[in-house]
Image: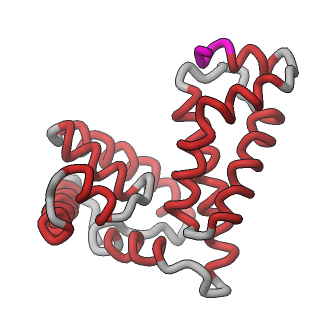
Amino acid sequence: MEDAEIVALYWARSEDAIRESERKYGPFCRSLAQNILSVREDAEECVNDTWYHAWNAMPEERPRHLRAWLGKVVRNLALDLWQRNHAKKRYGGMVLLLSELEDCIPSPGTVEETVEAAELGHIISRWLCTLPPEDRLLFVRRYWNGQALSDLAGETGLTPAKLAQKMHRLRLALKKALEKEGIGL
């Protein structure tokens, strides 16, 4: 079923919308949540919350790319749950991902920095567009989807060590691009 048809089902308040979303995007959403949370039960909770959120908050502008919209929802829910549970020291995977990026991306703390975070997002998006498609995909899959280096290495044919070097070079390139834009670290 096409995305527009699934969105129309949400607007018609048909329970088929959830069934079709689960059928088409359930594995993607589970994978994304699992990569962030590392705990299957928590990932499943986020996916179920995603369907609930979609049911209650399908935007009026009707997303053209339902996968991207659902991915954003499940990712935000997973990150929220990760933050709540992080105080309990339950997750190590996301700590590693964030620690890899902390040298090249400042974290917002004040209102002014929060406003500047939107501009930071635009700068990172422009930088991603300058990358070859395969590097862009690796960066997004690693730092947005939270995929493990070992999984990505297996798919690319690179050894984990070579892929780690490649990711390090990409992070250095991002840091250089941010510094060129006047973003201090």
Residue 11's quadrant in the figure? Answer: top right
At a point 64% along the width and 64% down the height, the residue shown is 40
Would you say the magenta stretch is mainly helix, strand or loop?
A: helix
Instruction: Say whether residue 137 is left or right of residue 89.
Output: left
At a point 76% along the width and 24% down the height, the residue shown is 17
* Residue 176 appears in the figure: no
The magenta stretch is 1-5
Q: Is residue 2 magenta?
A: yes
- Residue 81, image x, y percentages: 68, 66
Q: Nearer the viewer, residue 182 or 67?
A: 67
At a point 15% along the width and 65% down the height, the residue shown is 159
* Residue 48 appears in the figure: yes
- Residue 73, image x, y percentages: 63, 45
How many numbered callouts?
0
Is residue 153 depicted above or below 124 in this figure?
A: below
Residue 1's quadrant in the figure? Answer: top right
